[in-house]
Amino acid sequence: MNIHAKTLKELSKMLINKEIGAVELTRCFIDNIKRQDKELNCYITVCEDEALEKAREAQKLLDAGKNISPLCGIPFAVKDNICTKNIRTTCASKMLENFVPPYSATAVDKLEEKGAILLGKLNMDEFGMGCSTENSYFGPVRNPWNTEYVAGGSSGGSAAAVAANLAVFTLGSDTGGSIRQPAAFCGVVGLKPTYGLVSRYGLVAFASSLDQIGPIARDVTECAMVLNEIAGYDPMDSTSVKKASEDYSENLDQGIDGMKIGMPEEFFGTGLDPEIREAIFKTAEALERNGARIEKVSLPSLRHTVACYYLISSAEASSNLARYDGIRFGYRNPYAKTVDELYKLSRAEGFGREVKKRILLGTYALSSGFHDKLYIKALKVRRMILEDFNNALEKVDCLIAPVYPTAAFRADEDNSDDPLTKYLSDIYTAAVNLAGLPALAVPLGLDKCGLPTGMQIIGKAFSEKILLRAGYAVEQITGRVAGVEKRHAV
Amino acid sequence: MRLSKLQAELRGWKNGMQYEVVIGLEIHAELKTKSKMFCGCRNVFGGEPNANCCPVCLGMPGTLPVINRQAVIYAIKAGLAMNCKISEFSRMDRKNYFYPDMPKAYQISQYNIPLCHDGYVEIETDDQTKRIGIERIHLEEDAGKLIHDPNGQKTLIDYNRCGVPLIEIVTRPDIRSPKEARLVFESIRTILEYAGICDCRMQEGSLRADVNLSVRPLGEKALGTRTEMKNLNSFRAVERACEAEARRQIELLEKGLKIVRETRRWDDAKQASFPLRDKEENPDYRFFPEPDLVPIVVDADWINEIKASLPELPESRRKRYIEQMGIPSYDAGLIASNKAVSDFFDEAVKICGNYKLVSNWLMTEVLRLVNEKGEAVLPKLTARRFGELMVYCDNGGISQASAKKVLEMLCETDEEPCQIIERLGLKVQRDESIVESVVNKVIQDNPRAVADYKSGKTKAFGFLMGKVMAGLKGNGDPAQVKEILARELKSSKD
């Protein structure tokens, strides 16, 4: 039935018009997961029975036919650090291998209330720490475009699942680029919303002041439709923002005539793959032809991003992950004789190498004697970065920038003697999280190796509508990235 | 006695050295909000272990705290009641440590910007008012309770108390004796009760104190090495622990030994403190701002609103009693130290304006009843009925003895004082002709006593007085009876 070629809107129409049933559609996706996911490893948990049950309920809503949400009956999946009631939520860690939360994240609740159908839980870098989804207790995720390459991370499962038609849309989480980078690697659209737009309740914290849940889908419109459902104030999350709700999917095609788009010079310097630079420049020219005004802007403190990001995110992580001590939930070493031994052994065995590295780094940054020199200084730099963005965004409506210095890299690269290169590559994405701003990653086509390239559009706080409108314009220029769909047809 | 002994010890040791004790208190008070600090769980003492818990207060992955506005209001109330400045901008911080009683492995507390700071409380020492500085009052959450299996095999955890809102009140090291330490603790307890923010049940742990104490040679400016004592859950324990610790430190110094900076646990049964076996004496809590909560912003309007909701506080009442009502300082202090008694007094004097009479009756008869029957006797009596009874006493409408009788009866019935007085015929009899006739009858019936009186035995007058009063069923006005009896005796035939 060429399900893979249908957009979310088209699928919704088919469901409403009874051209396909919710159970049938769900079954299509579950079959596709069974067929393909052995190779890709996007899913940690597939909840087939629950999904089919939910599909039957959604069908009742569709049959009743009143006030039907466009997401009703649409199969989706979420990153495995987003809590799902009665379905295990592992964070891709041995520590939480058997953790079954008695509650769902607010974002999941909101989608399920609308009749969207949860297919399962998606693979990721353990606790969101990594950029390749290779730091998973459940094995690495492979890139659907070429399985010798990584899918990106940490929401690698979320991006690859969308690219390979293993869900119509997914939720990821973005702490330093974890939605945008895998979206770019997999040729799909990923949105990191403004900090506070989407409730973090039920998102297992990595770095609380940076984390944000966001949608990943195959096009901008779909992302906007999902954002419509998950955005909004949540009394359970004090950092979520009270503001009037917006329809993010309306007027996407309004065009970009007169839109001022900034290109921060610091984002296009050395280290950026020339092919990606070329692709972005070509897109910028096309946008200009469509009426946008491209301006050069500057973000001088960008060079401090990586140090600042790794200090703050690791400091918060060291505290957020301290609760995994083997006492109440999660992995417990069965042989410990004392409480100290229980802590040490459970944490030593339950956490992977990268997580332990970050906990050590963060603990160090907060320790007395280093606290002021590292953590407090990082907070100051964070303010500088925000001011730089504010200054730049005063002159323009949004910025365009690369997501990552390269396209997807090869899987199983041995980086053990060079731990910093990967950290440094977060430079384009992490600054956005430090500033709490929204950013939309959109695909720009394929590179010489046949791997997707992408760019991100960064905006002022709560300017998602502008980003989505700009993203839509880019999509009109580059087209939906085709190719992978044939390999992974439903 | 113990106190004076310590004072003697402070003043003169073998080598003639005199010492001064320097004490600061850290008082933890649980706030009596309906729900916990960061979740909707009920804030109640006890209950089935782990019955009042939810994913949030258990720190389960993905959950987030949401601050209880009432707890913030209560903490501000405490600050205002202790004359503190309120921070316009403060925030919660994370205090990181591993211990099974804290499920998140960090306590949400306040570190460098407490909600309230730089206040004071006043205590009365040797008829002097002494001001003790309050350095800060901050808001934090309580931890759970560990219950160790007596066989030593297992430790069980009850998280019911986990997440209960607490304030920590930190005094400046302005306290100079164990007695002052007790007085400060008592004064803060009274203030918290007045403000209605803590039920101050020390046996349940809702109010507890830690003591920081050091000694130094009298006249020395620098502070000595201090120790911290924990687990002090009564006023007496605070005083005794301070005495014992001061003595222990002085003895060490006298032997030429050094005081070790350490945390000690007071054992009230053994009347001694013991060092806690802490592996890490100065743990690094790695404080940083709690990213899951937004800053607490308090504006002047909000502060004024909270201020307006505070009742008149004990210190102000005490001063009012002394200065405006002429009540003796001791009595004024005692009445003001208990909100229920003080409220009772204030309402009663609205009805009977003889402040001294009312305070005397309150201090003797009413407090005796409170001691016998408990504080519940006050609402039973009602201040209004007590005030009305005092009106009778004040204008001589009934005798002292009758008033005591009526007071007792008011504890048992809902009758009005006037009804009881009427029913039992307790009104003072002042009708001169009636008194005269009783007097004359007594003179007639007791010729022997009359003769004794006339022969100069003044004792006989009292006997005759008693007879007359009895004849008036105890309702005579003693002055009037005396006058008429003397007159009639003089005019009676020999």
Image (spheres, coloured by chain):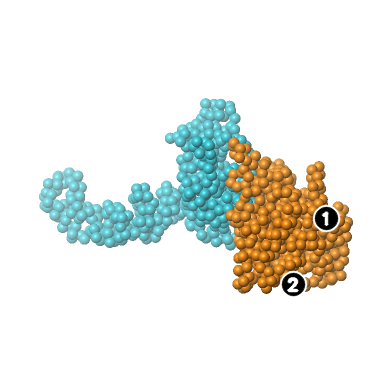
Residue A251 numbered tag: 2
Q: Marks 2 and 1, Cα distance to the nearest angstrom?
A: 31 Å
- Pointer 1 chain: A
The x, y position of residue B195, in whole percent, is 50, 54
In the rendered image, what is the letter of the chain coloured orange?
A
Residue that carries the numbered disc 1 in the rendered image:
A407
Give the image quarter of residue A236. Answer: bottom right
Mark 1: secondary structure: loop
Q: Residues within 10 Å of mark 1 (few under 14, many from 20)?
A: many
Q: Is residue A250 visible?
A: yes
Q: Amino acid at mark 2?
A: Asn
The x, y position of residue A54, in whole percent, is 62, 63
Q: Amino acid at mark 1?
A: Ala
Going 41% across and 49% down the picture, which residue do you hit?
Answer: B331
In the rendered image, what is the letter of the chain coloured cyan?
B
Going 60% across and 50% down the picture, which residue do you hit?
Answer: B59
